[in-house]
Image (spheres, rainbow, N blue to C red):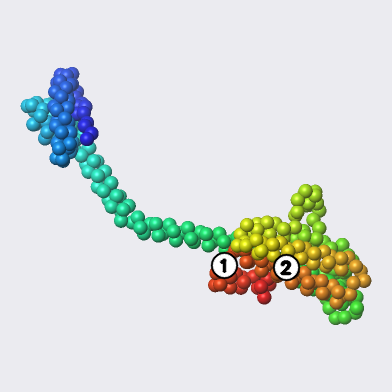
Amino acid sequence: MRCFSAPAAHSSSTVALFSHQTKTTRKSRARERFCSRSIRDENAGVKPRRDDDDEEEEEVFGGEREMRTTNTNTNATTTHRSKRGRRKKRDILLACGSLLLFSNTSSSQKEEEAFAAGMMDFTKQSQSTFQLGPLQVTLQRLRTLRNDIFTSLEEEEGKEGKKNEDDTGVVVVKPGSEEAIARLRNATLDCTSARPALEAYANVRDVCTLSIVLKSVSKKFATEEARERARERKDETVQAFAELERKLRDVNASKEDIDAEFENSRASVKRFAESVLEAFDFSDEEEKVKREAFPDLFS
């Protein structure tokens, strides 16, 4: 039980101050006796009285109650009431806080578990989108490149198609041109050869985006067999890109050969996307939603 000394009395006169110090000494002795008795009562199982009631205790244990000056008495009473009010508010807040804490423990735990599960699901969803996104970009760019090359071939054969660059400003992409190779490098995300800005870095590290995606999901596979299958599909896709590049460098390559290599590349990317999706171990419903979000990859 904590004991507090008497509040300092403020008086405008030296006599009042001296009188107060004398009274304080007597009161402190009375408080010591009171504290000793309270401790004995507490040990005996009797609930001690609060120190809020120290004004009343002074009458019992402090001897006679001396008269104070008007100013000193008023200040002490105001201070006492203010402290009592603050202690009361503190006790009420502590009691209410404890009640709310213990009553809401079970519900809070459930909310925290639900929040953690939601965060894990959000992380899995966002990571899968981040890894599948580049693969869909590759398919879209391959399709655009194929259409532009076929348009150029049709122009040369005199068939109906888009007009050449001199008439419309449309870039004509022909097999054997540097434009075709640069566009393929851009479509495969540096998996045929590194772009000029990455050439120096490519000497010490694999800059192919498919390799980066595989490395990101490699620890998520449930089995070593699934991990190895994903690695094989990635290698097959890179090899398909290389075959396509060889065809695009050949000025005499036919439309049929070029089309076959484009289709082989697209199919390889889709197979690799299946492995990437498998790594995240989605439920049937979640997997269905994810497939619908990437129609080019899973159609």
Asked which quadrant contains residue 208, the reply is bottom right
Determine the secondary structure under disc 2: helix
Image spot of residue 227 (x, y percent): 66, 61
Q: Residue furthest right?
A: 252
Which residue has dot 1 on it? 282
| SS type, badge 1 | loop
Q: Residue furthest left?
A: 64
Q: Are marks 1 and 2 in contact (CB under 8 Å)?
A: no
Residue 263 appears in which quarter of the rendering? bottom right
Question: Is residue 69 depicted above or below 161 in this figure?
Answer: above
The residue drawn where x is 36% and y is 59% is 107
Q: Nearer the viewer, residue 55 or 185?
A: 185
Q: Residue drawn at (17%, 31%), measured in percent from left and top?
A: 35
Residue corresponding to mark 2: 269
Q: Residue at x 87, y 62 (%)?
A: 178
Where is residue 175 drawn, in percent x and y? 88, 68
Of the pair 185 and 217, the residue shown nearer to us? 217
Q: Nearer the viewer, residue 127 or 153?
A: 127
> Residue visible at 40% across and 60% down?
110
The quarter of the rendered structure image containing the C terminus is bottom right
Q: Quadrant of residue 62?
A: top left
- Please tell me how crowded label 1 is: few (under 14), some (14-19), or many (20+) other residues with Cα within 10 Å: some
- Kindly identify the amino acid type of the residue bearing the numbered disc 1: Phe
Label 1 vs 2, first from the N-terminus: 2
Count of numbered labels shown in the rendering:
2
Q: Is residue 129 placed above or below 26 in the rendered structure?
A: below
Is there any visible trace of residue 11 in the rendered image? Answer: yes
- Amino acid type of disc 2? Val
Q: Which mark is residue 63?
A: none
Q: Is residue 187 visible?
A: no
